[in-house]
Image: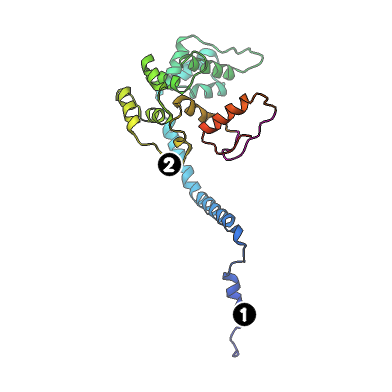
Amino acid sequence: AKVGESVVPAAQGQDDESDPEVDESLFDAIEASQRQKRLLKKGFEEEEGGLLKKRRLLEEEEKRPASDYTKINQLLNKWGLATDVLTKHVLESLTGAELTDLQSNNYVPDVHNAWKVPAELLQTHANLMRESKGPGGGPLDVVHCFRYRWKLDKEQDKALRELCHKDLRYVMKKYDGTAPLIQVIEEAKKAEPELDGTAFGAVLDAPGVAAISRYSRMELIDPVADCAVFGDANLMFSLNLARQRKALGHVGRVI
C-alpha cells in the first residue's frame, strides 16, 4: 500500500454482510421469529396513530342525547347520590331505555347495605332488568336464541331444528327478517358449503343444533391422537366415544 492510504481488511465487509451458518431444521423457527419482529415493529410504528384513531372512535360512540344525562342527574339527585362517582359510572353505562325504566319502577339502591355499595346494587338490578326482557324457560340452545331474536313461531322453530349443520349456519348468517324464513332455508339447501379451512366447514351433514352448539365447548381430545379407555367393562362409553369422534371427523383410534 502507498503512503497515506488506509488499509482495510478484505474480509471485514464480507464478515459484516454474511449470515451465520444455521442448521436447516431451524429455518422455519428463525423465519417465524423474524416475521414476528416485523409485525411488532409495524405495530409500534402505527401505535401512536392507532391510539388517536381509537380515541376519536370512542368519543363518537360515547356521544349520547342530552336527555340521557338529564335522566342520570335526576336519578342521582333522587337517590341522594349526586357525589357518588361509582353510581354515576354505572348509570352512564346504561341505555336510554334502561334509564327510563329506572325512573318508572321507583327503584332506590340501599345506601345502608353492609356488604355492597350502591353502585354494585345498581349494577345487579340493571342485570336483572336485562335478564327479565330476554328469553326464558331454562337452558337455551342456538335455535331458541335465534327464534327469540327474530320473533319466530313454533313452526319456524321446528323447521330450523330439522336443518343440517351447513344449512342452519347459512340461515343464521343470512337471515335478516327482510325475506321469508322458508325462502332463506331453500337458498341454504342449494348453497355451496363454505370450505374456507376453518371448523365452520366440518361435518356439514351433522344435525345443525348439535354441531353449532359444540363450538362453545372446549375440545379436550386431539382430533389426530389415539384414545385409550380403561375400566369400561361393557364398552358402552367406548362405543359412544368412538361414534362421537367419528361424527366430529377425528381420525384417531379409540382403544
In the depicted view, which residue is nearer to us: 154 or 69? 154
In three-dimensional space, the C-alpha distance between marks 2 and 1, rounded to whole angstroms, equals 56 Å
Residue 246 appearing in the image: yes
Q: Main secondary structure of the magenta part?
A: loop
Three-letter code, disc 2: Asp
Looking at the image, which residue is at 58% across and 70% down? 18
- Badge 1 crowding class, 10 Å Cα cut-off, few under 14, some 14 to 19, many 20 or more, is few
- Quarter the N terminus occupies: bottom right
> Looking at the picture, how far across and down is residue 157, in whole percent?
40, 18
The residue to which callout 1 is attached is: 9
Element on which disc 2 rests: loop
Q: Earlier in the sequence, mark 2 or mark 1?
A: 1
Residue 67 seen in the current view: no
Q: Position of residue 237 (x, y in %)?
A: 62, 25
For mark 2, what is the residue?
Answer: 196
Stretch in magenta: 220-230
Taking the image as shown, residue 190 lies to the left or right of residue 90, namely left
